[in-house]
Amino acid sequence: MSVKLNGVRVNRTEFMIWQYQNSITKRKILQTWRKNKQKFLQSLIWDKSNDNQSPPYAIQFYKSFKALLFQSYQEEFPDTEPDLSELCDWLSDNATICNFIEHKRDEQTWLDIRKAAKILLDGRLH
C-alpha cells in the first residue's frame, strides 16, 4: 500500500491522499503548531540553575500535541499506535503530499513538526 508522488514513495493509498485534503484533524495539527511553535521551542530552553527539572509548558504542549498526532495517524491506520520513528515517517509523508498538491506552507509545517519530533526522539524526551 504505497503511492509515488513526484518520484517519492509514500505509505498511503490514492484514497488516503484525497482524504488528507479533507482532514479536520490535520488542519488542527497545522494550526496548533503554527500558533504554539515559538512558545514550545522557547520553553525547551530553560535555566539549568533553576531547581525545575523540566520546562512545564513544553511537556504540557507536547503531551496534548502528541495525542493529536496519534489521533490523526489512527484515522488513516486504525488500530495501529505508531512508535515515534513511524510517526516521523508519517510526518514526512504528509510533507510529501503537501509538496505534491503544491501547499508549500503546509509542507514546511509538517517538516518543522517532524524536526521537533526527531529531536525529542533522538534526545529520548518522548
Image (cartoon, rainbow, N blue to C red):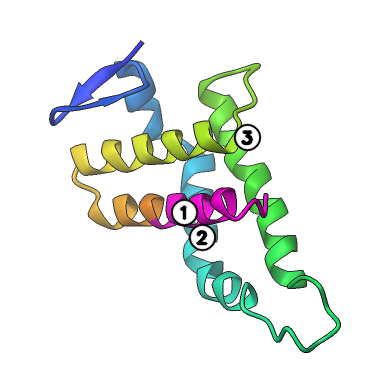
Decide whether the magenta segment is chiefly helix, strand or loop: helix
Q: Residue 108's x, y, as percent?
A: 31, 56
Three-letter code for the amino acid on which mark 2 is drawn: Trp
Marks 2 and 3, how far apart at CA: 15 Å
Q: Residue at the spot x=52%, y=68% of the render?
A: 37
Q: Tag 3, which secondary structure?
A: helix
Q: Is residue 68 above or below residue 13?
A: below
Ranked by sequence position, the earlier of labels 2 and 3 is 2
What's the magenta region? Answer: 112-126
User: In the displayed structure, does residue 107 sit left or right of residue 62?
Assistant: left
| Foreground pick, 36 / 57 | 57
Q: Residue at the spot x=37%, y=52% of the render?
A: 111
Please tell me the numbered disc located at residue 113: 1
Q: Count neighbours of disc 1 (C-alpha within 10 A) and say few if under 14, some if 14 to 19, many if 20 or more.
A: many
Q: Count neighbours of disc 2 (C-alpha within 10 A) and say few if under 14, some if 14 to 19, many if 20 or more.
A: some
Asked whether disc 1 touches disc 2, contact meaning CB atoms under 8 Å apart, the reply is yes
Q: Is residue 38 above or below residue 3?
A: below
Q: Say whether residue 45 is magenta.
A: no
User: In the displayed structure, does residue 42 sit left or right of residue 21?
Assistant: right
